[in-house]
Amino acid sequence: MAWARSSENSLGAAADAADNLTADFDASLSGLGHELGSAAYNMSEVLALPIFKQEGLENSFQYILCAATSPASKINEETVTYLNQRQSYELRLKRLGDNSSFQGGELLKSVVRVVFHDRRLQYTEYEQLAQWRSIRPNERLLDIDIPLSVNIYDIRKDPTAVNKVEFQWDPNKDTSVAIQVHCISTEFTAHRHGGEKGIPFRIQVDSYTTEDEHLHSASCQIKVFKPKGADRKIKTDREKMEKKPDKDKYQPSYEYTILTEVCVMPLHETQQCGPSDASFNSPASSSYNSSFHSPPDVNRSLQSPTTSAAAASNEDGGDKAGSVEPLAPGANIQETQSWLVHNRFGNYVRTFNNFAGADLLRLTREDLVQICGPADGIRLFNALQARAIRPRLTMYVCLESQHVYHAIFLENLCVEELKLKIAQLFNASPSQLADLYRQGPTGIHVIITDQMVQNLSDESCFALSMVKAENDENRYHVIFK
């Protein structure tokens, strides 16, 4: 069912409403006085800035949240935008470049979500949201103020995904959606002694064709306060900044927030993790996955952990004791889940249900210990960082008549192992090698024993000479010089 202006008079009223939206939102920032009044900026002038002139870029979009950024953001940090709980904020959507392909009335679909910014909370977001819903039943974390929205159609609000709203819009028309965030940042903070610091969220916008072909994604960092709290917070930040001697290290506050483009996985590749789940890079987090949807039944797609591990072991010809197949950075989500199950981390497939290989490999030891506990966290970190076992002794050898050295790696540190490695190196049979000698002081030949091998210095270099054995011309003594 579409929501739109149905008559010419209504269309005229919509245009007037669009022109007045900026003033309406400026008026709502009551705590900021005249600093953020309509005289402070003009949105048409903002849109004319060079940063917005990106014509010719295919599938390039522009999302502007009409809310002020904090004046306390350092230059090298991502900005944070303060919002008031339940207050309507205009989010403008625009497709840049040539829209001729949409002249026939084709619409686009956008999904707006509020997700966690903090990576540790992302791991438990399903549980966090379930708890929030139990405390505040029949409420939505994110909602749309329909009377203040312009040119949006087919609005959908999934009752099980209370952090997400979905709608369609015409890229040839001025479009804005008025969003409301009903939770505050301290609701997801562990309450102990009062005065807890609120956690940041992200507003994320994903745009698709009506056939679910992903086109563009962008997000910004926000904090949500009780009514009027955001206005007071910005005012307090401004006062603090006036007293700081190093103001040049901080970004200026802007009366609008430009959502930053992020890389997101196509929708058809993330359906296993819930519709519109995203895995993207943000300025504040090198890789970051957000979804408030219920995790899928992993056992349904991967069988059971025991069965899958056994199947993987059989396919590989049996699992070697203690061996760990390294996780490739380019592994997709399904391959990463299979790796977890195969390496006896099946209990955490649900936790990492939308992590690709690169996401998992970026986690630190401390991150994994906090998520999985000390025992499994350390074991998972060691498995992720698995490398070839370093040999106990490395030697570099070459024939005396040559100058190209070859590496020999020893694990057992015995003469028989050394003979075998030398024979393999020179395509000979171990039976052709008699005793091994090391040239000592004044040119004497000292027979090499297991004890001598064990006391050789790592990465020693030797030139080898072959001398025929006196009693058997088909065998050779090897002298290490």
Image (cartoon, rainbow, N blue to C red):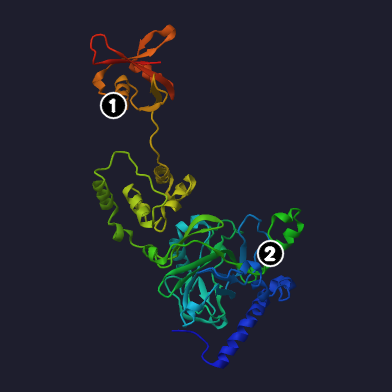
Give whichever of 129, 355 is nearer the camera: 355
In the rendered image, residue 342, in percent from the top left (x then y), is placed at 31, 49
Q: Which residue is mark 2?
A: 253
**How many neighbours does mark 1 have within 10 angstroms: few (below 14), some (14-19), or many (20 or more)?**
few
The mark found on residue 213 in the picture is none
341 relative to 404 in the view: left or right: left
Secondary structure of residue under mark 2: loop
Circle 2 crowding by C-alpha within 10 Å: few under 14, some 14–19, many from 20:
some
Q: Is residue 293 above or below residue 336?
A: below
Q: Amino acid at mark 1?
A: Asn
Q: Residue at x 33, y 25 (%)?
A: 412
Q: Amino acid at mark 2?
A: Ser
Q: Quadrant of the C terminus?
A: top left
- Kindly identify which numbered label has been placed on residue 427: 1
Work out whether mark 2 precedes mark 1 in sequence or the reverse, and give the earlier one.
2
Residue 316, horizontal then vertical, whole percent: 26, 45
2 vs 1, front mark: 1
Secondary element under disc 1, as helix, strand or loop, is loop
Q: Is residue 224 above or below residue 2?
A: above
The picture places residue 164, in percent across and down from the top left corner, at 47, 71
The quarter in which the N terminus is drawn is bottom left
* Pick the front one: 391 or 197: 391
